Image (cartoon, helix red, strand yellow):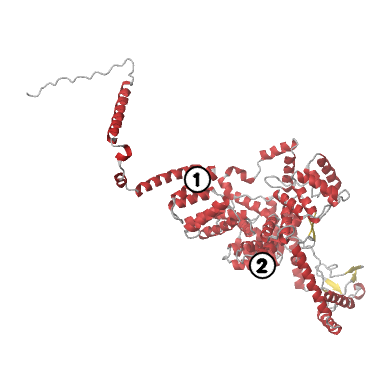
Amino acid sequence: MGRRARLGLVLCLAALWAGGLTAADEEGNQDESLESKTLSAEDQVKDHSTGTRVVAGQIFLESGKSDSQSENEENFHGQEEEKGNSLEELNSLEMSNLLNKDLEEAEIQSPVLTAIGGTADGEPCHFPFLFMEKEYAECTADGREDGRLWCATTYDYKKDQKWGFCETEEQSNKRRQMQEAEDVYQTGMKILNESNKKAQKKEAYQYLLKAADMNHTKAMEKVSYALLFGDYLKQNIQSSKELFEKLTEEGSPKGQMALGFLYASGLGVNSSQAKALVYYTFGALGGNLIAHMILGYRYWAGIGVLQSCESALTHYRLVANHVASDISLTGGTVVQRIRLADEVENPGMASGMLEEDLIQYYQFLAEKGDVQAQVGLGQLHLHGGRGVEQNHQMYSEGSDVVPQSNETALQYFKKAADMGNPVGQSGLGMAYLYGRGVPVNYELALKYFQKAAEQGWVDGQLQLGSMYYNGIGVKRDYKQALKYFNLASQGGHILAFYNLAQMHATGTGVMRSCHTAVELFKNVCERGRWSERLMTAYNSYKDGDSNSAVVQYLLLAEQGYEVAQSNAAFILDQKEASIVGENETYPRALLHWNRAASQGYTVARIKLGDYHFYGFGTDVDYETAFIHYRLASEQQHSAQAMFNLGYMHEKGLGIKQDIHLAKRFYDMAAEASPDAQVPVFLALCKLGVIYSLQYVRDINIREVFSHIDMDQLLGPEWDLYLMTIIALLLGTIIAYRQRQHQAIPRPAGLRPAVPQQEPPPEHQPPQ
């Protein structure tokens, strides 16, 4: 064994000397939990931008390189050749000495397990050993009622009776305790995964709590997040913080990421962006995908770090590779982005959910043969969401409900394709491309993909772009690939965004653009499984649990979700979250309005102007408010921003008073939105009165009349004309009033009352 190991080591060193080793890529297992996904060390080290990749049944080759890449590779190979030549110049004696020295230092002794107690205390365990006519290659608990591990120190235990324990009693107790904790954890996870009822999920978390009390790491991770979000356990930020600190000490990437989140958001601890960055970095180094996503957003937006597009690209690309590898041919899960602010302003929008009668309407259209309605309902049931339960019965991919069957899928695809259905055409193209139930035929695959793409079907466009990109069945054409990837991305296909991001990141077929690549990769990352937390947070808010909702939105906001940033700011703005102190509510809301505005959300930009105008969470600053309103007006054409700019020009707040510009912005607001017409009309009436008063105040009436020459203006006899006009007007008024008195009718049968004469007084005054 020693000679073989030595020989292998010599060969390895010789290979390193000749030209270096090539590391093989290995796919790491992914944690499917919503809280985070963790990469293995190999996944983090490997270069995701090179080699051949098959994503969701799509061959994605990275062999296409631009001219600049080819030049860089030639320079790189030239440097390697120079290094090889310089190594060959070393004499054989120096090289042999170097190899001998490396052999002495690199020789690794395999660990020897020593028996503890028993009949062979201190002797090395012998593997394999024979016990009860069975060979054991490792320690076993067979034959012992206490479950303690032991080994034999000779091959035949029955013959020699030489044995000893493989662990101390303390180690044995600890191992059995951890095994018991693992059993409890698995019981809880089984209930959690197999049930949709809230009561059973709460029962599952009781098992997880028990396992967490026994220091089971995965159970502690599940429980800590449940305590943080209030998922099936009462929300307790302090308890979750203590668990996260314990997990961090044990080196858990999930614990490190979560502790970074607490310091970033100031929940349960004093806010510290520096500490948050440290914990996020450790979590990312441990392979936590959410930590990578958070760091990608921070480097992209320059939050707590110097803005660096290339660093953001590195983090986002790594996460996007894993998200894309999870996406099936049907496009991945549906991400529902519901804005709480829009819901309050438009309560009739049904909360972004499809009403039952609307679904029935689509079902009616589907039964009548409407292809778009059929496809839409199929996608809705496949991915779930918008009030429809997930129900995936796909023969082409298989599921827990329907077994995978190429023959059955091909049968249905042919029927649909014969009727001109793009879904069937795309499905047939996939069958011929990958040989599913039929021989591989790239020409037929290309033909069916083209037919599907011509009808606007995104899967056909995506696969057609992939064939042009890789040169499968057609001549490689990056422009055509870019065209079809762009068309598929307009239909919302996540793999189209991913492929476009790869092309922009490497400069393949387009000018390299780090900024565009990062935005596209960010879009892909936000379609990961953790996006389901958006709907969970929304449901918590609708159930009246604002504290749970705001914590979930804050974590998603850290990941760069603009909708989560605006929703978290909205809840804080409404002062509905009691876990945040009253003095901290507006400053934190201001922070997240600012981040949402930076991503182009108009309402957030207007909110920033309002906060600086009224002094919410900051000092009153009319100039800054004016800047935010102007940005919202120029970039997003917001009617509200235009109206506010008109008001500030009218009052001279943050800008020089200008009634003419005020009227201009009011008019622009009325043109931008019909809803603004009534307030604009009232504002213009007020502006007209103010303008008239200002005009009268600015002029001197006596001075105006003193400069007027009536003889020159109306002629020398203007006074006679004026008197005549006045007389005519007076005569007209008198005649009109007399006619009114004559025209008043009197009721029939009534006579005017005769005034009663007073009786003569009894006593006349003396004359």
Q: What's under tag 2, amino acid-wise? A: Thr
At label 1, the amino acid type is Asp
Can residue 756 be seen?
yes
Mark 1 element type: helix
Residue annotated with mark 2:
281
Front residue of 511/441: it is 511
- As drawn, the label of residue 296 is none
Q: 149 above or below 417?
A: below
For the residue carrying disc 2, how many other residues have a C-alpha within 10 Å: few (<14), some (14-19), or many (20+)? many
Which label's residue is closer to the chain start, 1 or 2?
Answer: 2
Q: Position of residue 315 (x, y in %)?
A: 69, 63
Residue at 67%, 40% in the rendered image: 356
Label 1: few (<14), some (14–19) or many (≥20) C-alpha neighbours in 10 Å: many
The answer to whether residue 575 is seen in the rendering is no
Q: Residue furthest top?
A: 749
Q: Is residue 533 or residue 741 the one in the foreground? A: 741
| Quarter of the view holding residue 265 | bottom right
Q: Nearer the viewer, mark 1 or mark 2?
A: 1
Q: Where is residue 607? Give x, y as percent.
A: 53, 54
On screen, residue 151 above or below 716: below
Residue hosting label 1: 667
In the rendered image, which quarter contains the N terminus?
bottom right
Residue 737, percent from left and from top = 31, 26
